Image: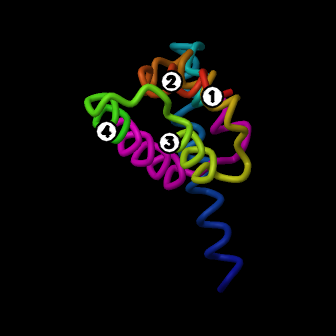
Amino acid sequence: MDSNVELASRVKLLEYHQRLLLKLLSAPNLEFYRLVIENGISEHEVQAFNKLCEGLNIKMEEQKAEGFIHFQPLFIEFLNSLPAKLDGKEVIQSCLKQHLYVPLFIEFTKCL
């Protein structure tokens, strides 16, 4: 039974990566998708990553409105929430190249 569940999970991951590969064929600059595939990140993990970035983006905008200019605590929260397979610097650079959460990741480059 466990092997069937594991097999189904692996097939689902491969199907997800195949969809991303098809997107990469038409737009090779989708660096974050390339990173997802290379590191075996699941669709669920990517959804959690997007939710994390949306939340951090909102927090950053709220903090900016309050006059904050340094976002090291948000950066640390980001790094601590990443899947272990991913490198923070690589993720930030790939997301900027793919134009994902640009204001957030521009601020995070200042923390590198």
Circle number at residue 107:
2
Q: Is residue 37 above or below residue 65?
A: below
Specify few, some or many for label 4: CA neighbours under 10 Å numbering under 14, 14-19, or 20 or more.
Answer: few
Q: Magenta stretch containing residue 111, yes or no?
A: no
- Sequence-wise, which precedes: disc 2 or disc 4? 4
Is residue 36 within the magenta segment? yes
* Residue type highlighted by circle 4: Ile
Q: How many marks?
A: 4
Q: Circle 1 sits on which residue?
A: 111
Q: Considering only order in the chain, which callout, 1 or 3, is on the residue closer to the N terminus?
A: 3
Place residue 104 in its image quadrant. top left
Residue 58, labelled with which disc?
4
Q: What is the three-letter code of the residue carrying label 1?
A: Cys
* Mark 3 in CB contact with mark 4 (< 8 angstroms): no
Residue density around tag 1, few if under 14, some if 14–19, many if 20 or more, within 10 Å: some
Left or right of 33? Residue 85 is: right
The residue carrying mark 3 is 74
Tell me the residue at 44%/20% (across/down): 102
Return the disc, 1 or 4, that comes first in the chain's sequence: 4
* Mark 3 to mark 1 CA distance (whole Å): 10 Å
Q: Residues within 10 Å of mark 3 (few under 14, many from 20)?
A: some
Between residues 13 and 38, which one lies in front from this camera angle? 38
Instruction: Give the residues in magenta.
Output: 34-58
